[in-house]
Amino acid sequence: MRQEIENRAAASAPYSLNLDGKVCVATGAGSGIGAGIARAFAGVGAHVALVDRNLGGAEAVAAELRNAGAVAQAIGCDVSDEASVSEAAGAARAALGPASVLVNNAGLLRAGPLDKVSIADWNQAIAVNLTGSLLCARAFGADMLATGKGSIVHVASIAALNPQTNSGSYSPSKAAVLLLSRQAVSGFRNAPSK
Ligand SMILES: NC(=O)c1ccc[n+]([C@@H]2O[C@H](COP(=O)([O-])OP(=O)(O)OC[C@H]3O[C@@H](n4cnc5c(N)ncnc54)[C@H](O)[C@@H]3O)[C@@H](O)[C@H]2O)c1
């Protein structure tokens, strides 16, 4: 798996990605794009924390990675729940060490136009897509602030930039994820006062 990913990277980029031994966290890694991110991390040597509220899904992907020789740990977590995220960050640190990379990928689409989307669906889209990204950035980013280096990637969507049919709660939540990412770049925390 690693050779295949390295070959692809070498063919498409003027550099090679090497995350040997770095602890890389992917949320929503129990299926879909998140599982693909976890496989890509493992392919370049990372020690992978697969965070998902679907623990069974995350465990299945983690087992696949371990069978291929990678270091991988599945962690059950609801990214919209602060206590759950805090526990997950502690579990990842205990199992693998401090995080170097976080991909905030966990997300969901609650379809419906603005005049029909239920407030429960609206709140859930915001809670998972936006608040979940903040909670994970804070919890896993604490390791990065402590070591002075690290990277956080937010998965938004084309829907963040363009309104789409039936995307009443999804598009606004993903647009906010874009600005959360820019806000984090401009100042994840205030400089210490002198
Ligand atoms: N699939 C697409 O076409 C597409 C396009 C643009 C953006 N995206 C974004 O990419 C990301 C992944 O999408 P996907 O298509 O792989 O979706 P998916 O539904 O296949 O996977 C999402 C994963 O997130 C997990 N998850 C959902 N809510 C969670 C929560 N509260 N806590 C922890 N885990 C949770 C699910 O269990 C699932 O494993 C999402 O943020 C999505 O909005 C997807």
Image (cartoon, rainbow, N blue to C red):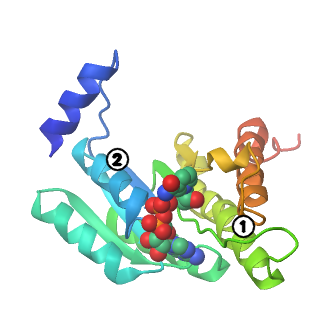
Identity of the residue drawn at 84% across and 68% down: 114
Query: Would residue 97 be seen by someone viewing this image from the given angle?
Result: no
> Where in the figure is residue 165, as x and y percent of width and height?
72, 58
> Where in the figure is residue 132, as x and y percent of width and height?
65, 67
Q: Secondary structure at mark 2?
A: loop
Left or right position of 62 against 36: left
Residue type marked 2: Lys
Q: Secondary structure at mark 1?
A: helix
Query: Would residue 146 be seen by someone viewing this image from the given angle?
Result: yes
Residue placed furthest toward the top? 14
> Where in the figure is residue 164, as x and y percent of width and height?
72, 53
Residue type marked 1: Thr
Left or right position of 145 against 45: right
Identity of the residue drawn at 28% across and 53% down: 39
Identity of the residue drawn at 77% across and 45% down: 179
> Where in the figure is residue 32, as x and y percent of width and height?
39, 62
Q: Which residue is mark 1?
A: 131
Q: Nearer the viewer, mark 1 or mark 2?
A: 1
Mark 1 vs mark 2, CA separation in Å:
26 Å
Identity of the residue drawn at 71% across and 62% down: 170
Instruction: Tell me which label, 1 or 2, sits earlier in the chain.
Output: 2
Query: For this rendering, which residue is in front, 163 or 90?
Result: 163
Q: How many marks?
A: 2
Q: Which mark is residue 5?
A: none
Query: For this rendering, which residue is in front, 77 or 116?
Result: 116
Q: Which residue is mark 2?
A: 22
Neighbours of disc 1 within 10 Å: few (<14), some (14-19), many (20+):
many
Looking at the rendered image, the quarter that the C terminus falls into is top right
Instruction: Indicate the quadrant where residue 15 lies.
Output: top left
Instruction: Indicate the quadrant where residue 91 lies.
Output: bottom left
Cβ of mark 1 under 8 Å from ligand 1: the answer is no
